[in-house]
Structures are given as structure tokens and as C-alpha cells.
Amino acid sequence: MSSIFLRGGLIVGESSTAVGDVLVVDGRIAGVGDVGEVPSDALEIDASGCWVGPGLVDLHTHLREPGREEAETIESGALAGAVGGFTALVAMPNTEPALDNVALVSYVLDRGERTPIDVAVAGAISVGRRGEMLAPLAEMAALGVRLFTDDGIGVQNPALMRRALEYAKPLGVRLAQHCEDELLAGGGSMNEGALSSRLGLVGRPALAEELMVLRDIELVRLTGGAVHFLHLSTRRSLDMVVAARREGLPVTFEVAPHHFTLDETSCEQFDALFKVHPPLRPRGDVDALRDALRAGLVDAVATDHAPHAPELKDLAFDEAPAGMLGLEHVASLTFEALGGPEASAVAFYALLSRGPARIAHLRAGDQRVRHSAHGGSLSPGEDANLMVFDPAARWTARSSALHSRATNSPYDGRELVGKVRATIAKGTLVAFDGELA
Ligand SMILES: [Zn+2]
């Protein structure tokens, strides 16, 4: 194995920061601060002016394999993640077929082990994600699966969701819900409001999301099972989950970069790059998400990275599939939302690494199968999953420069501040300055 010497960065701990060096030897953090003697063959990276924190963890990545390999594979998604600063991804189960059994979960875990970073799996809640019969949660949990979701769609049937929560609780696993009542969402393709009426598009009302959030909070209260709310997009959704968490209910939530960066007016040109479920919301909701991020109320930022083949995103707005890329830009967009130059480094790594690692059970000491530890405190002895971020770098997002197999990014041409400088996964430099190492 090799060693890496990160010189003179701002080391970002759980609650404080300090300038110092970090030495990585044989896959582990060997020294922090004053590291003593550095091996002569160590790869030295000048981290002065940069933040050095734990590698990012994405709770919500659509890797598309098996079934849609033309859009993304486990390998291409993992490499895009590495460039974006990620050392672990949670692969969502809405593949074709869905990840609803031990054989398919094992397949993705095996393929994930051939990538430079860790790929965990979220299993489906219901067989085929059809919302009819429970999938074998216990068998998948025995493989190390700690999150279950039918994402792409929420569990519509409240009785099935209740049973899933009752079943999940003794397993110590968490259900992750895509909150949208599909009957209320009514096949809509953007946020319902004055703008959707003017554009002549069928809208998905905010209430479709908020009603399921309300329902699931009450099901958590009834069953004691844990729910992670995926990609919340409205002020009322946030208010409800924050209040439930304050009550002590086992609920967590994530927000996605597109929901705190873009608003519904992006849909005015009928460009399907901006179609996503839940939809982009009015500016008031975007501002509420940004306020919540800065107020420390959000458990995690998660990408909902959703690759699609170009011919599908070229369809008419109401016919195109929903979803957009996120892995390679989320660090900069989160930095921007936290205030750019004013951003708290501790909050940045809490949202993108330590919070999601806790929710996905990927921290040291959590029960893990086949994965190294993530979201650590940067102490000697920890698995060396690290991300170096340059808060002063300025750059322009280019879809042509993406490492994802797909190109459906809504950020092409956007000026960004702050950039992932280096990703170190399991002790190896895997990406440097926007390229694979
Ligand atoms: Zn979703």
C-alpha cells in the first residue's frame, strides 16, 4: 500500500477546525496535526487554503444497473461520484429489475466492490416496487442493507407502509420514502400553480408531497419504526419533519441540490432537463430550504443523481422521464447555499458526509458488511476516506466534462465557487481536481 501526505489544510472535525497535516498510510489515517516523520515515498498534496474533511456520502444515487446501462453503470456512477468528492454511495433500487431480493442486492454489492469507492445498497420495500407485497427485508438486511425504499415512487398504500415499518423496526433498519401521493400528483410534470397553468402543463401540487409526509409521521408515531424522508422540497414538509424530530420521533430528512438551487421558472422553456419529481418549486420554497440548510436543521444533502439517456430527455416535457444529475456539482452547490465564503466547513461536512453516513449506518462501529467506515472525525486509526475542498476555487460547470455516462445536468454553464480538489477512498487518491487520478 501507499502513503499520502496532505500538507497544511484546514482539518474539519465534528465541531471544530484546526490547520495541520494529515498522513495516510496503508488505507488508514496515521497522523493528524503534527504527523511526525513522513515516509519518503509519500504522495504529497498541498492542501493549504483547502478544507480537509471526511469523504462525501450520497444517500440517494440512481446507478441504473441492471437494466439501463446506457444511462449509467455502477462503475461509471462510482467514478462520477469520486470526482464529485464521494467515497460512498447508496445505490437506489429502482433498477430493472428492482433490487428487491438477495441475488440482485448481492450483484450490485459485488460490482460495487470493483469500483474505487464503497457502494452500499438500498433495498426495495415492496416486491418489484409495485406497492403490493413486502419484499424480503430481513434477508436483505442480513447482507448489510440498512435502508429500504421504493424510490421513484412512494409507498402509496398506508397499510403496507405500516406493515413495512412494523417489520423494519426489530431489524434496526430505516425506511426511506419518496413522498408524493400519486393520485394527487395526477401525472403532472411540474409544480402546480399559476406558472403551470400559464404553460399549459399539468401540475403536481405541493400537497401531494405534504400529505404523505404527514401520513408517514403519524405511521412512525404509531409503529415506532424509523423513516428517512427523501428529497423534501416544500417549506411545509420541512416544518412538519423538523417538528416531529423535535418530538423525538425517529425521523430524518434530506434535501437535494436542485431543490435548493433551481426554482420552477426553469421549466418555462419546456426543457426536460428541469423535469424532476418532486418538481422544482416556487422561489419561496427554495429560500426555505436554503434557510434550513444555514440554520443547521437539515440532516443530509443527497443528490438524487438520476441519469437518463439523451434521447429520453429530448422528449416533450410532459413525456420525458423525471430526474437530473447531481454527483459532480453537489459539493459546490451546497457550499454556495451555505453562504459561499461565509459557509461553515463543519456544516458542509455534516450535511454531505457525517449526517448521511450516520443515516446509512456507514460510520465506524456501525454494523457494516463489506464497506469501510465513512463520515469519521478524522482521528488516527480511522479508515482513510477523505475529501479535500478548495473554498476559493472558481469554475464553470460543463456537461461535456462530466464523468457520468449521462449528460442530463441542469447546471451546464453555471459559474460555481468552491471545488473538490481531491478524493481519497480507502487510502488511495481516486480523483484530483475534476479528473480521475
Ligand atoms: Zn425520489
Image (cartoon, rainbow, N blue to C red):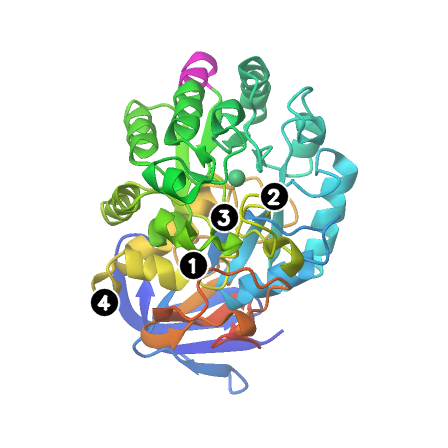
Residue 274 position, x and y percent, is: 47, 52
Q: Residue at x 37, y 42 (%)?
A: 198
Residue 42 image point, x, y percent: 52, 82
Determine the secondary structure under disc 3: loop
Label 3 – label 4 distance at C-alpha: 30 Å
* C-alpha distance separating marks 1 and 3: 18 Å
Q: Extreme right residue here?
A: 103
Q: Is mark 4 on a helix, strand or loop?
A: helix
Rendered position, 422 above or below 69: below
Q: What residue type is labelled 2?
A: Met
Q: Earlier in the sequence, mark 1 or mark 3?
A: 3
Give the residue type that dot 3 points to: Lys
- Where is mark 2, residue-wise? 92
Q: In which quadrant of the rendered view does residue 46 lie?
A: bottom left
Q: Mark 4 points at which residue?
A: 341
In the image, residue 94 sits, relative to residue 430, either above or below, namely above
Asked if marks 1 and 3 touch (Cβ < 8 Å), the reply is no
In the rendered image, the vertical position of residue 323 relative to residue 247, given as above or below: below
| Image quarter (top left, top right, bottom left or bottom right) of the N terminus | bottom right
Question: In the image, which residues are magenta?
Answer: 218-224
**Residue at image point 49% right, 48% down:** 275
Give the mark nearest the N terminus, 2 or 1: 2
* Ligand 1 contact, mark 3 (Cβ < 8 Å): no
Q: Which amino acid does label 4 sit on?
A: Pro
Please check the rendered image and state whether residue 169 is part of the magenta-colored stretch, yes or no: no
Disc 4: CA contacts within 10 A as few (<14), some (14-19) or many (>=20) = few
Residue 209 lies, in percent from the top left, at: 42, 30
Label 2 CA crowd tier, 10 Å (few <14, some 14–19, many 20+): many
Q: Which of marks 2 and 3 is nearer the N terminus?
A: 2
The answer to whether the residue bearing label 2 lies less than 8 angstroms from the nearest atom of ligand 1 is yes
Which one is closest to the eye, mark 1 or mark 3? 3
